[in-house]
Image (cartoon, rainbow, N blue to C red):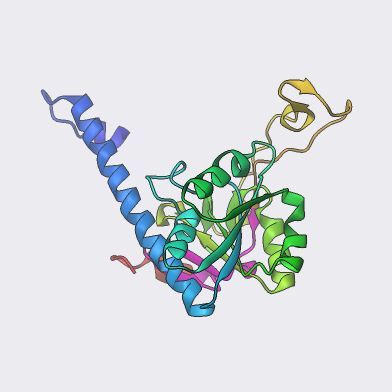
Amino acid sequence: MRDRLMRVKHGDDPLAALEAEAVAIHLSDREANLTMAQLGADLIRKHQGNLQTVLTHCNTGALATGGFGTALGVIRAAHLEGMIERVYADETRPWLQGSRLTAWELANEGIPVTLNADSAAAHLMRTKGITWVIVGADRITANGDVANKIGTYQLAVAAMHHGVRFMVVAPSSTIDMDMASGDDIIIEDRDGRELLEVGGQRVGAEVEAFNPVFDVTPADLIDAIVTEKGIVERPDTARMAQLMSRKHLH
């Protein structure tokens, strides 16, 4: 937006220029969402054509994007094609984006959804026939490591153990090719009161709380990264570089 404002010619209306840029960004993001959604749905069909039971984390739907969603967009597209039997949505502590946003979006779409505690994820994989874990990303590094909402890493570890496929869905703007690996990502620690209080009332003991916002999932735990440029299966540095060298969509 700052760059767009700097390009406004003398005498032009800066507010109109910024509004036009905002609309263009929104439409571009929605187009990317729809492309990723179809690519992800096609990938699900490629590997497993039967009804899917999927697990997702945090919120990656229309409320978080330009109107369709990244990981949730894939789930929506797969549901429209008759491939989704049920979605399990992690509650996503401590801000509960899964229960407050994702579960609401899925229910509103008529997609069968069950809310679960984050700590139930591995048990779900073992007992409920989970076939895919589908998540978004806040940043992806040059080697395919993925930073996402805290709890994503443990989902990937559990998925690997249980033979569940793990898909990351994010626009190519999330990929930072100047960052070699997830080791270079600085993880923010938030106020411990988010864990120690509920509704402003102290419920935890007088102890310290460890409350990181994100974690990093190593690339070798990821089956596929889906972007609007295409899909990288079994991501590594070479495959990520090949994806980002493409000038056109997929």
Locate residue 212, reporting x and y percent. Answer: 69, 41
Give yes or no for residue 220 being in the magenta stretch: yes
User: Residue 134's image quarter?
Assistant: bottom right
Residue 144 appearing in the image? no
26 or 121: nearer the viewer: 121
Residue at the extreme top of the image, as rendered: 200
Kindly identify the residue that appears in the image at 47 percent across and 70 percent down. 232
The spot of residue 83 in percent (x, y) is 49, 69
**Residue placed most toward the observer, 65 or 49:** 49
**Residue drawn at point x = 25 percent, y = 43 percent:** 24
Q: How many marks?
A: 0
Residue 144 to residue 113: above or below: below
Residue 216 appears left or right of 102? right
Q: Is residue 140 left or right of residue 96?
A: left
Regarding residue 5, the answer to whether it shows in the image is yes
225 falls in the magenta region: yes
Q: Which of the two residues, 225 or 159, is positioned nearer the viewer here?
A: 159
Q: Bounds of the magenta span?
A: 216-237
Q: Residue at x 64, y 59 (%)?
A: 217
For the C terminus, the quadrant is bottom left
200 in relation to 158, above or below: above
Rendered location of residue 82, percent (x, y): 46, 68
The N terminus is located in which quarter?
A: top left
Residue 13, how many percent across, how many down? 16, 24
The residue drawn where x is 77% and y is 51% is 119
